[in-house]
Image (spheres, grey):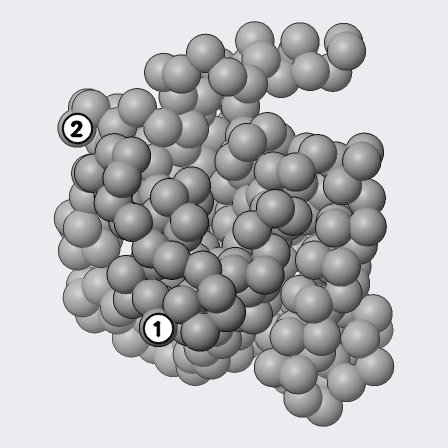
Amino acid sequence: MIGRDLLHKMKEKACFSSPLTPDAKKGGGKFSRQVTHGSYLMKGKSNRPMEDYLVSEQKMIDEDALGLFAIYDGHMGHAVANYLQLNLFDNILKQGDFWTDIKIAIKSAYQKTDKEILEKSFELGKGGSTAVNAILINGQKLVVANVGDSRAVISKKGVAKQLSVDHDPTREKKMIESKGGFVSNLPGDVPRVDGQLAVARAFGDKSLKKHVTSEPDIAVQTIDDDVEFLILASDGVWTVMSNQDAVNSIKAIKEPHAAAKHLVDEALSRKSRDDISCVVVRFQ
């Protein structure tokens, strides 16, 4: 109960990072660019507890430098998003084919994690969470996977490029209907699966699981000299800003924590009322 009260009172949380440089890698040859990252969270205007969680870290695994970045946006409670923060990357990295077929590894880990969440529904509740995960390998290869409407966007020569896929119920209507579900704009004014959930893919959501999948979309992006930075953010940003708006807003801000905070502040100034979480990764 104490943890829930503290989470409810939390208004903002800032996360800082130290750069992982080429010298930090034992082999020295693969990791060719300095990578810095920062993050920021802000509780929304609602009376419910904060439901966003994030991951923003870099680590060495043997001779490889990995950047692990994620946004988890919970709904109907924060327990599922918290579980993802604690477990999803571990499940991905434990897959035997992580280094040989990372897409298969990610899909397997998403399926495994969703199964764990459903099996723990008595403990975690019947809520769910969207997710966008980004794995940076040796500063050169970026792999993004997502379910839901949190986004991954890169700036390439100042032009925004979305790497994730917004899983809107209207876009996935045929798939939902093929499983016996339906999409309705009632109640409210946004399309919802079975009139309840405003995203077509998510972790958890036990009561809707027959119609809502946790199958991720996956994109691979080479980080060359034209890619300046990566933004991961929950829909508290994207409901009030376009991808290019977000890139333009922080392109001159070199320090990633300051950039993440500025992006959150900009979303608030545009009347975003949702919880907002943001990770910015800079490629020097």
- The residue closer to the viewer here, 225 or 234, is 234
Q: Residue at x 66, y 38 (%)?
A: 126
Which mark identifies residue 270? 2
Could you tell me which quadrant the C terminus lies in? bottom left
Q: Quadrant of residue 158?
A: bottom left
Q: Is residue 99 above or below residue 21?
A: below
Which mark identifies residue 174? 1
Q: Residue at x 50, y 69 (%)?
A: 179
| Kind of residue at badge 2 | Arg
Q: Quadrant of residue 226?
A: bottom left
Question: Residue 118, image x and y in percent?
Answer: 74, 50
Q: Quadrant of residue 127?
A: top right
Q: Is residue 224 above or below residue 176?
A: below
Question: Residue 15, image x and y in percent?
Answer: 56, 33
Residue sitting farthest toward the front:
180
Question: Residue 185, image x and y in percent?
Answer: 25, 45
Q: Residue at x 81, y 50 (%)?
A: 119
| Kind of residue at badge 1 | Lys
Q: Secondary structure at mark 2?
A: loop
Q: Is residue 266 above or below residue 248?
A: above
Q: Earlier in the sequence, mark 1 or mark 2?
A: 1
Badge 1, how many Cα within 10 Å: few under 14, some, many 20+? some
Q: How many marks?
A: 2
Q: Does residue 131 appear left or right of residue 85 in this picture?
A: left
